[in-house]
Amino acid sequence: MVSYSYSSSNLLSSFVLCVVLVANAFQCFTSDATSTLMVDGSPNSGRPIPNTFLGAFFEEINHAGAGGLWAELVSNRGRFEGGRGSGSPSSIYPWRVIGNESLISVSTDQTSCFERNKIALRMEVLCNGPKSCPPAGVGVSNPGYWGMNIEKGKKYKLVMYVKVKASGPVDLQVSLTGSVHRVNMVSIISFSAMTDNNFSKWTKVEGILESKATNHNSNLQITTTTRAILWLDQVSLMPLDTYKVVALLKDTI
């Protein structure tokens, strides 16, 4: 144990020193204090800038890029924040589960094929077939950024990575639904005969969804009626009609 002792003279000296320091610190705030700033604005004072020096600054704030200029319609397409360390929480927001807990269990794990982001979405389907599963199946849906703006007659490209563990063929369906009564708005993409043989490892699948109606608050749905465990990652949906072939939305340029 360390003890300290102070004499009265030491305390008095310390007090006087503090008073002097505080008084000096506040001298700069007196009304008679003046400051002078010298600025040299002559032509020869600046640094020469070449005519070829061009630049642009962009800062991603409030979805100016993702959900704004970028044509990606899926929000949180593969990040599933958290889960990097053991016991870390993960979030699938804004993904939503289709079906109750007796029909499907949705979570995340670190099995992705992407080394820089190992978190993937895991769906364990507990029901099997039309007798125990709802007619439209169970799965997950994504509302995009405040609802996906889907327009009649336009085509949208789907890209996602899938892995399957099942005792038999799995039928996976992808569709776009409207915000009212969840009416199907597109020709459904069906990935049938997905088995352990051809989908036991991460596989990239693609398809085109063509809209039959316009809805500014649509959702992307991924569903199945087959008992299985499915992993999803990097789920992407973009309009084919983008600004000058690059992945930027036309209506934001």
Image (cartoon, grey):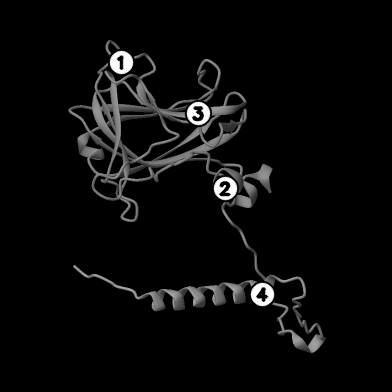
Residue 27 badge: 4
Which is more N-terminal, label 1 or label 2?
Answer: 2
| Residue plotted at (57% across, 72% down) | 22
Where's residue 69, x and y in %?
A: 61, 48
Q: Which of the numbered marks, if any, corresponds to residue 219? A: 3
Res. 133 mark: 1
Structural distance between the alpha carbons of marks 2 and 1? 36 Å
User: In the structure shown, which secondary structural element does the residue marked by tag 3 occupy?
Assistant: strand
- Which of pointers 1 and 4 lies earlier in the amino acid sequence? 4
The mark nearer the N terminus, 4 or 3, is: 4
The amino acid pointed to by label 4 is: Gln
Observer-nearest of 42 and 195: 42
Is 203 positioned to the left or the right of 24 in the image?
left
Q: Is residue 9 above or below residue 103?
A: below
Looking at the image, residue 117 sits to the left or right of residue 75; the answer is: left
Mark 1 or 3 closer to N-term? Answer: 1
Whether pointer 2 and pointer 1 mark residues with C-beta atoms closer than 8 Å, the reply is no
Q: CA distance from mark 2 to mark 3?
A: 18 Å
Residue 122, given in percent of the width and then of the height, sits at 29, 35
Residues at badges 1 and 4 in contact (C-beta under 8 Å)? no
At label 3, the amino acid type is: Asn
Residue 203 location (% of width, % of height)? 31, 43
The three-letter code of the residue at mark 2 reads Trp
Residue at 65% across, 68% down: 55
Which residue is the site of mark 2? 70
Task: Work out whether residue 225 or residue 118 is closer to the camera in this orientation and state it.
Answer: 118
Q: Are marks 1 and 3 in contact (CB under 8 Å)?
A: no
> Is 44 placed left or right of 206 in the picture?
right
Residue 32, numbered label: none
Task: Tell me the SS state at disc 4.
Answer: helix
